[in-house]
């Protein structure tokens, strides 16, 4: 049966880039096809019907046509604009980080409905809740797991013995936790406290409601951030621009608070 020339899908816009004089290349994440790229022709023109309907972090209903190498977006309707996110710089930065993680951990046209619902649930939570670092930690663990890189958090990745409630060590290259006796077997390790390991296990098997109930001291939050972002950086073999931007925002906020005191 021949493939239909046009089809309809909902999608979350991960990012866009200008193309030519008036077009834009969009990276979209869809529930049934996974990540796809499409061209919104003429979208940058003042009178374009697509203008304002296919911006990053929007959930849209789209009509697309199969092009020679890219999909062509012919119609768009906003389903969720996430206005509270888009009107707050901190929330926007965190949401763009989640979108960049989704883009980085997925391949084109590889259906993964749990990733779509993970991203959509994340945006909805950010829309109604204050920005919290724990949401990013949860997303990092979950997106890595959906991509097939769930960290081993219950047994030592070297000797395979059950982990004891002591300070253990996380190894990005080993894909999990080393016991104290095996910490020397990997070149780069990060100390992982008993409480830190408990929270990582909760984030790995829980949901956002679980994450939202967690309370962490600043040192514990920093410990988990170094571990999960280090793991992401190892898997992707690069830094993410949105993560760097969040760090600059945090440093600027700290500087302003220091001056105010």
Image (cartoon, rainbow, N blue to C red):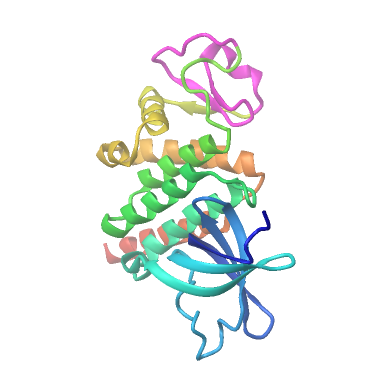
Q: Kindly indicate the quadrant of the structure image that contains residue 123.
A: bottom left
Assess whether residue 6 is covered by the magenta stretch. no
Residue 226 visible (yes or no): no
Q: Describe residue 128's horizontal placement relative to residue 110 as left or right.
A: left
Residue 256 visible (yes or no): yes
Q: Is residue 7 above or below residue 112?
A: below
Q: Is residue 19 above or below residue 227?
A: below
Residue 229 percent across, percent down from the top left: 52, 42
- Looking at this view, name the residue that lies furthest to the right: 68
Q: Nearer the viewer, residue 104 or 188?
A: 104
Q: Nearer the viewer, residue 220 or 74?
A: 74
Residue 247 percent across, percent down from the top left: 47, 56
Q: Nearer the viewer, residue 63 or 127?
A: 63
Q: Describe residue 191's horizontal placement relative to residue 198 as left or right.
A: right
Q: Is residue 97 above or below residue 182?
A: below
Residue 112 percent across, percent down from the top left: 53, 44
Residue depicted at x 45% and y 78%: 52
Which stretch appears magenta?
Answer: 159-187
Residue depicted at x 62% and y 29%: 188
Residue depicted at x 29% and y 36%: 210
Residue 142 percent across, percent down from the top left: 46, 38
């Amino acid at each position: 049966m021949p493939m239909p020339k046009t089809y309809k899908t909902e999608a979350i816009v991960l990012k866009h880039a200008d193309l030519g004089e008036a077009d834009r290349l969009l990276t979209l994440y869809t529930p049934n096809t996974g990540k796809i790229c499409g061209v919104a022709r003429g979208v940058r023109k003042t009178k374009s019907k697509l203008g304002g309907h296919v911006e990053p972090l929007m959930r849209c209903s789209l009509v697309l046509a199969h092009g020679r190498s890219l999909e062509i977006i012919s119609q768009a309707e906003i389903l969720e604009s996430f206005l509270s996110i888009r009107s707050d710089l901190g929330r926007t930065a965190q949401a763009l980080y989640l979108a960049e993680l989704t883009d980085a951990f997925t391949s084109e046209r590889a259906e993964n409905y749990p990733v779509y619902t993970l991203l959509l649930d994340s945006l909805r939570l950010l829309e109604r809740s204050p920005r919290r670092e724990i949401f990013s930690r949860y997303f990092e663990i979950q997106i890595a797991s959906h991509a097939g890189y769930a960290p081993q958090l219950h047994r030592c990745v070297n000797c395979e013995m059950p982990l004891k409630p002591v300070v253990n060590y996380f190894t990005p290259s080993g894909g999990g936790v080393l016991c104290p006796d095996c910490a020397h077997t990997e070149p780069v390790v990060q100390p992982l406290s008993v409480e830190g390991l408990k929270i990582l296990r909760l984030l790995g098997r829980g949901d956002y409601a679980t994450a939202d109930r967690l309370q962490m001291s600043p040192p514990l939050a920093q410990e988990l951030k170094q571990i999960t972002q280090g793991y992401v950086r190892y898997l992707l073999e690069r830094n993410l621009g949105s993560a760097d931007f969040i760090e600059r925002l945090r440093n600027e906020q700290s500087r302003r608070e220091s001056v105010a005191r």
